[in-house]
Amino acid sequence: NAAGIFVMSQINGSVVGNTIQNSIPSAAAPRGIELGVIPGNPNTPIMSSYITIARNTIRSITTTQANGAYGIYLDFGATNANANRFIKIHNNMISGNSAGGASRI
C-alpha cells in the first residue's frame, strides 16, 4: 500500500491545496491521501484528530490489482476510540481513479 500523503496519529493537521497524481500501476491499494493509525502498535492506536482535508486535486490513482484505488482513505483501526475524530473533508476534486476489480460468478 502506498499513499501520496500519509498522516498518522496527528492532532490539528491540515492537508490543503495539494495536487496528487499518478501511481505505480502494480501497487496494491494505492491512496491519494490516507489518515491512519500505526497497526499493531499499542502506543499509537488513535487515529488523527482535528484534521482538515480541503481543496486538494487527486487524479489518476490507478492499480492493476483487484484491491481498489482510493482518492481519500480513512483507516479507523480496530478501536472504538476513533469514532469522533473531528475530521473535515470538503472541496476536494477526485478524478480518473481505477482498479482492476474482481468478478464472481
Image (cartoon, grey):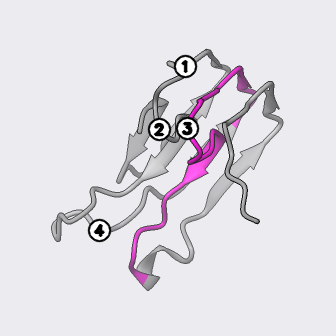
Which numbered disc flags the more N-terminal residue, 4 or 3? 4
Q: Secondary structure at mark 1?
A: loop
Q: Is residue 7 above or below residue 47?
A: above
Q: Which residue is rendered at x = 83% and y = 36% of the image?
A: 91
Q: Is residue 18 above or below residue 83?
A: above
Q: Which mark is residue 65?
A: 3
The three-letter code of the residue at mark 1 reads Ser
Q: Point out the stretch of residues depicted in magenta.
A: 54-79
Q: Which residue is mark 2?
A: 28
Q: Which mark is residue 23?
A: 1
Gap in angstroms between the C-alphas marked 4 and 3: 28 Å
Q: Secondary structure at mark 3?
A: loop
- Check if mark 4's residue and mark 1's residue have beta carbons within 8 Å: no
- Check if mark 3's residue and mark 2's residue have beta carbons within 8 Å: yes
Which numbered disc flags the more N-terminal residue, 3 or 1? 1
- Check if mark 1's residue and mark 2's residue have beta carbons within 8 Å: no
Gap in angstroms between the C-alphas marked 3 and 1: 12 Å
Residue extending farthest to the front is 105
Which numbered disc flags the more N-terminal residue, 3 or 2? 2
Q: Secondary structure at mark 4?
A: loop
Q: Which residue is mark 4?
A: 45
The three-letter code of the residue at mark 4 reads Pro
Pinpoint residue 19: horizontal percent, then vertical percent: 66, 15
